[in-house]
Amino acid sequence: MNKFPFAFLDEQSKKEIRRAILKGVAIPGYQVPFASREMPIGRGWGTGGLQITLALVGKEDVLKVIDQGSDESVNAVNIKKLVQNTTGVQTTIHTSEATLIQSRHRIPEVPLRSDQILVLQVPEPEPLRRVERSEFKTKQLHAEKEYSGAWLWLFEQIMRYNQTTQGADYPVLVHERYVMNPSPIPRFDNPKINDSDALILFGAGREKKIYAVPPYTKVESLAFDDYPFEIEKFEGKACKVTGLTNVFLDEMTDEVTGETYYVCNDTSFMQEYLEKRGTVNVR
């Protein structure tokens, strides 16, 4: 007999997390504090996202967990096992089959639907932390909609390098009100948050914050008129396995020949693409 309650957390804990989620949905981009619980994984390895997943998962859900584009990384596999062992829910590697998706560092390449929820793991939820260390002060700045520090951070990059060099965690303006950290996803994924069909939730366990972007919400990456926001470009490059060019690519090196090549970062998307063409069978 399982000694843990359904989905590991007790019902009171799950209710408290759901209340924080509801407040986050009601105020897009606003960081809602919550009483982050101790989890059987180290803080900084997805405890915030995991708590959201455990608070929301139901017996009929189909779960997908990815880490930096892979379903088979140690972090993804262990989180998936914990949820499955305490709930018995079905798991999948296919984005289109999942109702609940927990991710670290990536938004899937497959467009999300309105019946899906994406949970992103967040190490640092505060977009102003680079310029202001005081939590009290950053709360005041958000209340006053004073985001000159975030703009200054990008301006300094342009002055030094003639372009914004912020790769992951590129700040966004949500619903024309709150500046938000979109989690350490690459800039390539920022546009996917804007007007998304799916509900996107962000959990920071160590920092004890939950925030959300409801479906069909306007989300803009911060940018200057003369230095517009740009995603990573892979001009002249294609995935070696699929031949695709409109996906986020990882640069790889052949250990034998030393040849540099590129592959799609989203491994399940790559497998699904090949599956549809009868090239491989991942089942």
Image: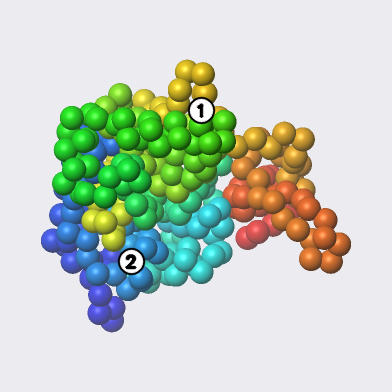
Eye-nearest disc, 2 or 1: 1
In this orientation, which residue lies closer to the viewer: 109 or 88? 109
Q: Residue at x 75, y 39 (%)?
A: 237
- Lower position in the chain sequence, tag 2 or tag 1: 2
Determine whether 97 is above or below 157 in the image.
below
Amino acid residing under circle 1: Phe
Question: Residue 152 appears at what percent x and percent y?
Answer: 38, 33
Amino acid residing under circle 2: Arg
Q: Quadrant of residue 30?
A: top left
Residue at the far top in the pictured view: 225
Residue 187 is labelled as: none
Q: Can I make out residue 103 in this image?
A: yes
Q: Residues within 10 Å of mark 2 (few under 14, many from 20)?
A: some
Question: Residue 117 appears at what percent x and percent y?
Answer: 37, 44
Question: Residue 274 appears at what percent x and percent y?
Answer: 71, 48
The span from disc 2 to disc 1 (Cα, nearest Å) is: 32 Å
Quickly name the residue at label 1: 229
Q: Residue at x 49, y 41 (%)?
A: 166
Residue 43 is labelled as: 2
Q: Is residue 275 left or right of residue 93?
A: right
Q: Residue at x 84, y 66 (%)?
A: 256
Question: Residue 242 appears at what percent x and percent y?
Answer: 74, 45
In this orientation, which residue lies closer to the viewer: 224 or 65? 224
Residue at the far front in the pictured view: 160
Q: Quadrant of residue 54?
A: bottom left
Q: Can I make out residue 194 in this image?
A: no
Determine whether 74 is above or below 224 in the image.
below
